Amino acid sequence: MARSLQYLEGILTQNKFLSSSSLSPPDILVGFPLLSLPSQILSSFPYLSTWLENVKQETKPWADQIVGVGEPTATKEKKDGKSKKAKTDGGKKQTEPKATARKLRILCIHGYRQNGKTFRDKLGSFR
């Protein structure tokens, strides 16, 4: 892990982003999993920390869901002491749609001389 972060740090000393002068898909694909790293690990990599902050700012709506900055609506309702499940308007009940965060799903396809079982075993804790 440390070698990978050091490699990224080397790339980011030359460029503001990974593959171009602005935010691109590789920045998002590489940056999102790293957003959940503790700040103690990132403190020794100043360019990497700056880059992750840029990725987080550019992709604010998605980054909040991954890092967990945004609270679920149920928690907010408990803190406010008000329920937002149903509102009454002249005797008619209106329900608000529930906002749920979706899990990130990645499709992994096994290779030519593998089958689903062996590939699953190789992935192990990555799942």
Image (tube, grey):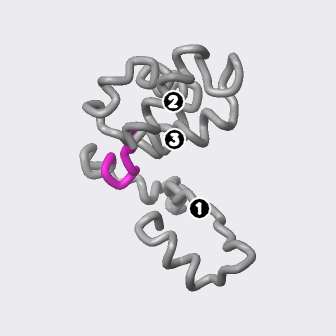
Distance from disc 2 to disc 3, alpha carbons, whole Å, reads 14 Å
Q: Is the residue under label 3 in contact with that under label 2 (CB below 8 Å)?
A: no
Magenta part of the protein: which range? 68-76
- Residue 14, compared with residue 36, is above or below; it is above
Instruction: Measure the C-alpha gap from mark 1 to mark 2.
Output: 24 Å
State the CA–CA distance, disc 3 to disc 1. 13 Å
- 82 or 52, nearer to the observer: 52
- Name the quadrant containing residue 45: top left
What label sits on residue 105 in the rendered view?
1
Q: Residues within 10 Å of mark 1 (few under 14, many from 20)?
A: few
Is 73 magenta? The answer is: yes
| Camera-side mark, 2 or 3 | 2
Which mark is on residue 32?
3
Note whether 107 is above or below 13 in the view shown: below
Would you say 72 lies left or right of 80 here?
right
Q: Which mark's residue is nearer the viewer, 1 or 2?
A: 2
In the image, 20: left or right of 43?
right
Residue 91 position within the rendered picture, expressed as x and y whole percent measured from the top left: 50, 61
| Label 3 element class | helix
* Residue 8: image tag: 2
Residue type pointed to by label 3: Phe
Q: Earlier in the sequence, mark 2 or mark 3?
A: 2
Return the mark for residue 18: none
- Point out the tag, 1 or 2, that comes first from the N-terminus: 2
Q: Residue 55: x percent and y percent?
A: 54, 28
